[in-house]
Image (spheres, rainbow, N blue to C red):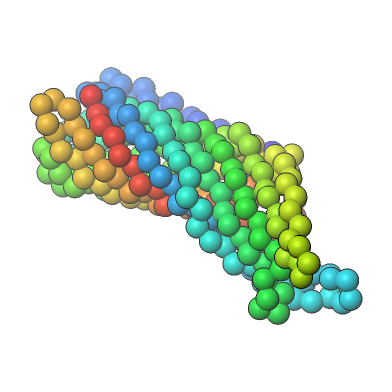
Amino acid sequence: MNKKIKKGLKRNILFFLLISVFVSETSALEIKIMGGYNFSRYTFIPETYMGIDWDQGVEFRTRSNLKKRLLMGVGVEFLLNKYIGIEMDILYFQKGCHLKVYRMDIPVQTTDYSLDALSLPLLLKIKLRPASSPYIICGCEFSYILSHNSKYTLESIVEPYQYEQDLKDRTLNFDIAWVLGGGFEIKIQGVTFFVEGRFHLGIENIMSESYPYELIKTKSEALLFGFKL
């Protein structure tokens, strides 16, 4: 892990602990249970690179497509007042990407990436009304990457060739992302039900070395359902 990531990690953990102490002394607490779907993809930079085929160097272009996976977890929401709260979650977050590589606009390779992470979002929540209400959330996400794999399919005139690879050794242990979203909650007989959408924008290159691209970042759109007690 490089010095930049270590410094940012220490700062986020310190901020997380300070907020926890503050809100636990000054606010009410609600337990949140949630699950849903995550639609994720990677950002590859550069999208166009030079590669070598059997005959000559040619230009290759990547195209990233959404991959649907699951997420689930629990959280705590500290209510500072009727309109503002601070939320901390622990989520099992499955990310990934479907990637196609084109050589002269002809698909030559398909790669299916799968990344599993333990996600720790820290969010500010603002309600528009004190009771059942729409709301917005914003904050940051710190993720510990549990596994990262890829499955390749090389196109062939005769028969496609497939192989799998474990990328964990070439992947950083941590990822950091900004989070922005919103939702709606309604309270029925003491239980609050909610539906929520979140956009996660990764800000770190998750690869520790070129593979074969210079930089890979995560990007996710999550749809969550759940209830609070």
Q: Residue at x 49, y 38 (%)?
A: 93
Q: Is residue 185 above or below residue 209?
A: above
Q: Residue at x 10, y 26 (%)?
A: 189
Of 222 and 199, nearer the camera is 222
Q: Which residue is at the far right?
A: 55
Q: Residue at x 67, y 67 (%)?
A: 101
Q: Residue 42 lies in what quarter of the image?
A: bottom right
Assign the C terminus to one quadrant of the image. top left
Q: Residue at x 74, y 45 (%)?
A: 165
Asked whether residue 160 appears in the rendered view, the answer is yes
Horizontal and vertical percent position of residue 115: 59, 43
In the displayed structure, does residue 9 sit left or right of residue 106? left
Q: Is residue 107 above or below residue 168?
A: below
Horizontal and vertical percent position of residue 34: 34, 33
Q: Residue 192 lies in what quarter of the image?
A: top left
In the displayed structure, does residue 170 sit left or right of residue 229? right
Q: Which residue is at the far top?
A: 25
Horizontal and vertical percent position of residue 88: 37, 32
In the displayed structure, does residue 25 sit left or right of residue 147? left
Horizontal and vertical percent position of residue 29: 25, 23
In the displayed structure, does residue 102 sit left or right of residue 161? left
Assign the N terminus to one quadrant of the image. top right
